[in-house]
Image: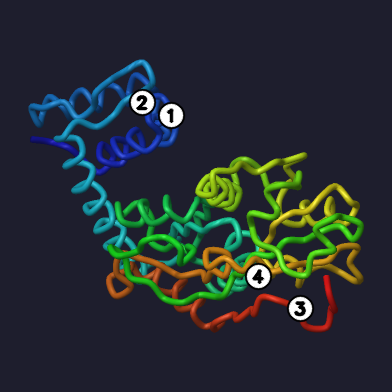
Amino acid sequence: MHFDLIDLRLYLNILDAGNITAGAVRSHLSLPAASARIRALETSLGTPFFQRGRRGVTPTPAGKALAQHARLMLQQAERLRQDLAEYAHGVKGQVRLLGNSAAISEYLPERLADFLCNHPHIDLDLQELPSLRIVHTISQGAAELGIISDAVDTRDLQTRAFCDDPLVVAIPLGHALAQQPHLRFSDTLHHEQVGLPAGSALAAYLEEQALHLGMRLQLRVRADGFDGVLRMVARGAGPGIVPQATLERWPGAAAFVSRPLPEPWARRKLLLCARSFEHLPGYARALLDALCAHGQVDVEPGQLPGTGDR
């Protein structure tokens, strides 16, 4: 039995990408070299790890077991590298942080910029995913830290409060919904809206909530991010749903009104999550401490301070 960390990292990259070609690219290997390594790995251990099909590869039962051990071994190797790096100079570490749409766009840019300035020896691998996928990815050991909505099941992870993140509907002043003092999410589904990009975690979350009601989101256009949604709403394109934090950043007077969504899933909180906060590698613990040092951000749904009704 013979394999090395390059083999294990290649195997996980192929598994995550769903095909050998993309996994080879992620591993900075040519396709022939990657294929040869996988064949040698399967031969040395005496069992296939992939089922190859027209749409890519899926793990065999043995492959699933290998993936679990490979992630643990690579994590331990990274912790060893980080601990020893403290004795060297010029060696950089990397932390993989996953976040949902609101966390990535509204709460993290300034905090992460401050962290990077204060920790020049650490790089960040930041990726936006839906909360449910973040939980799965963290549980599998493929990332150190995540920021998720409290609406998902986190029984296999440890969590800490990060901030409140209520959702609101921004409505053009002349729109029919602007005349209603109280709205439910179902009320918005009868109107064409300005939506988020199809790959946005919040877009997928809102579409899922609509399906629970037996309805679909009616989108006139997908804007590029939360600011894009508000700019289109302000010009009368239609209502749009955004985190209340986005409204707080809107400059000057607004040509729209806002209504909080009363559903429990919309009055959400964001949580930091990890498999174990105590066993995080040193670089990830430093990031966790920095994020927690900012304190809880409490945003009460409703009227925004100093802005009137918008």
Q: Residue at x 35, y 52 (%)?
A: 136
**Element marked by disc 2:** helix
Q: Residue at x 50, y 50 (%)?
A: 129
Q: CA distance from mark 3 to mark 1?
A: 46 Å
Residues at circles 1 and 2 in contact by the CB criterion of under 8 Å: yes
**Counting other residues with Cα less than 10 Å from the Cα at mark 3, is it few (<14), some (14-19), or many (20 or more)?**
some
Residue 20 numbered tag: 2
Q: Amino acid at mark 1?
A: Ala
Question: Which quadrant of the figure has residue 95?
Answer: bottom left
Q: Is residue 165 above or below residue 17?
A: below
Q: CA distance from mark 3 to mark 2?
A: 50 Å
Question: Which quadrant of the figure has residue 180?
Answer: bottom right
Q: Is residue 221 above or below residue 83?
A: above
Q: CA distance from mark 1 to mark 2?
A: 6 Å
The foreground one among 280 and 218 is: 218
Q: Amino acid at mark 4?
A: Glu
Residues at circles 4 and 2 in contact by the CB criterion of under 8 Å: no
The answer to whether residue 91 is seen in the rendering is: no
Label 4 or label 1, whichever comes before in sequence order: 1
Residue 304 numbered tag: 3
